[in-house]
Image: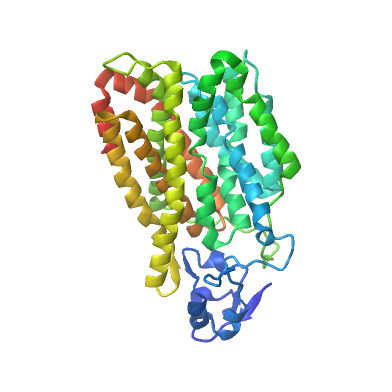
């Protein structure tokens, strides 16, 4: 085990179980939410002997947490190209279920519900047998679910199987990346764009290409080939347990955690609800809708695609700016709560976007909402990853479940609400 002697004046929270050593392999987990990331601060906190042994980023500005091992099998030692390839594969895989559940509205209930529940089972299996086997074998179920006769049943089965890349992405990022790079990788892995790609692309293809495009058979097969040829297992055990007994799950789960997960689900539910009911709202005749045709509705879906990409680009730089500013203010110490400052910007943009969606052009309001959702997603996922470094997969699964539970309910509420009470009341209540 990688340990080093601590000076006598060091705080107890940095010490290992014997009270004398710093266990570099587990410090990141024990000090979750409050890390010493400045090399100069590390000299003051840990002493000269330990700080000189710490591995730093290429530019020398950050201490790497968790500390990479000398094992070449350690995913943190992979080159940038290999890491980017694994991230690209799991990001592309996350789009698969949306090709099956993003087109229709009436039969979405069980598909979206199974998508959330399936994520919990995917995390359990990933912890036991690894990331790559779960990703590969569950995607086979998604690829074979293409029967038109049993479309509703297969759609639900597909959603259950394909939930794996939604929730294991954070596991893979945590395996490959050190602390200072994780927030940007979360931006790259975001699956928000996936729910808009299928209606945008397939809305033009289905009228001429037939029903087979709607279940993504070709796309699923291509992704399956990518996993088979280029996929690599990222699971890596960094520390040797002090006991042969299985460790008890000790993830803190209190009222604040439940409220945070619920908030994420509620915020995302409005985005999902708007997405799955857009074809209904825009296709209705005035005054309830805009009486748009199929091609016009498909073209409008370019708005959330572009705005989601722009939102995640902004989130990456804004997050780095906020976190680095607070690290300098705290004299080299990182606090996980600094991630949440971006959330305030997201809420402000989101509320304005809801009212713009009502009284101004649809494109501006929808774009503002998707930028806000992107900022919120990066902030919440990065914060949760910092607070629960040992259980980032479980947190990702719970977030996916809350998002799905809230999302499928909005698919049934939104259209009837707008038709009966009007868009003013529906979007006004959501904004409040």
For the residue pair 94 and 324, the one nearer the viewer reads as 324
* Residue at (48% x, 31% y) in the render: 196
Q: Indicate how the structure is coloured in the image.
A: rainbow
**Residue 287, above or below 369:** above
Q: Position of residue 107 (x, y in %)?
A: 50, 20
Relative side of 61 to 412, left or right: right
Q: Position of residue 90 (x, y in %)?
A: 62, 43
Q: Quadrant of residue 402?
A: top left
Quadrant (top left/top right/bottom left/bottom right) for the N terminus: bottom right
* Residue at (59% x, 57% y) in the render: 248
* Residue at (57% x, 25% y) in the render: 100
Quadrant (top left/top right/bottom left/bottom right) for the C terminus: top left
For the residue pair 2 and 234, the one nearer the viewer reads as 234
Q: Position of residue 247 (x, y in %)?
A: 62, 59
Relative side of 148 to 379, left or right: right
For the residue pair 205 and 39, the one nearer the viewer reads as 205
**Residue 341, above or below 209:** below
Please count the marks in the image: 0
* Residue at (63% x, 56% y) in the render: 176
Residue 380 visible, this orientation = no
Q: Position of residue 227 (x, y in %)?
A: 70, 40
Q: Quadrant of residue 223?
A: top right
Relative side of 300 to 237, left or right: left
Residue 183 visible, this orientation = yes
Q: Quadrant of residue 151?
A: top right
């Amino acid at each position: 085990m990688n340990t080093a002697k601590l000076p006598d004046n060091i705080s107890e929270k940095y010490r290992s179980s014997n009270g004398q050593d710093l266990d570099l392999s587990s410090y990141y987990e024990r000090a979750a939410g409050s890390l010493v990331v400045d090399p100069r601060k590390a000299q003051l906190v840990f002493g000269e002997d330990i700080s000189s042994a710490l591995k730093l980023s290429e530019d020398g500005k950050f201490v790497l947490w968790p500390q990479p091992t000398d094992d070449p099998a350690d995913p943190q030692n992979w080159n940038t190209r290999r890491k980017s390839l694994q991230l690209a594969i799991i990001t592309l895989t996350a789009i698969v279920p949306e090709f099956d559940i993003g087109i229709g509205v009436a039969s979405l209930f069980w598909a979206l519900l199974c998508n959330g529940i399936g994520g919990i089972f995917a995390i359990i299996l990933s912890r036991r047998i690894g990331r790559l086997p779960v990703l590969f074998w569950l995607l086979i179920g998604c690829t074979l679910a293409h029967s038109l006769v049993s479309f509703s049943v297969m759609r639900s089965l597909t959603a259950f199987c394909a939930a794996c890349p939604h929730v294991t992405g954070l596991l893979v990022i945590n395996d490959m990346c050190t602390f200072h790079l994780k927030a940007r990788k979360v931006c790259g892995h975001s699956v928000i764009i996936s729910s808009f790609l299928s209606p945008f692309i397939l809305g033009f293809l289905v009228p001429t290409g037939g029903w087979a495009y709607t279940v993504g058979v070709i796309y699923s097969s291509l992704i399956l080939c990518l996993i088979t040829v280029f996929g690599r297992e990222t699971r890596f055990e960094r520390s040797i347990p002090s006991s042969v007994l299985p460790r008890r799950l000790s993830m803190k789960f209190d009222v604040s955690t439940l409220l945070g997960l619920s908030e994420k689900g509620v915020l995302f539910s409005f985005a999902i609800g708007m997405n799955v009911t857009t074809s209904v709202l825009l296709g209705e005749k005035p005054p309830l809708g805009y009486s748009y045709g199929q091609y016009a509705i498909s073209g409008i879906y370019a708005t959330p695609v572009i705005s989601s990409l722009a939102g995640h680009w902004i989130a990456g730089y804004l997050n780095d700016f906020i976190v680095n500013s607070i690290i300098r203010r705290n004299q080299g110490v990182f606090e996980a709560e600094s991630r949440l400052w971006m959330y305030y910007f997201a809420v402000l943009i989101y509320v304005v976007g809801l009212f713009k969606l009502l009284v101004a052009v649809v494109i501006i309001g929808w774009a503002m909402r998707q930028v806000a959702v992107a900022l919120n997603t990066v902030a919440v996922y990065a914060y949760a990853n910092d607070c629960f470094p040992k259980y980032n997969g479980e947190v990702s699964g719970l977030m996916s479940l809350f998002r799905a539970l809230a999302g499928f309910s909005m698919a049934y509420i939104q259209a009837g609400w707008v038709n009966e009470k009007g868009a003013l009341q529906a979007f006004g209540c959501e904004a409040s």
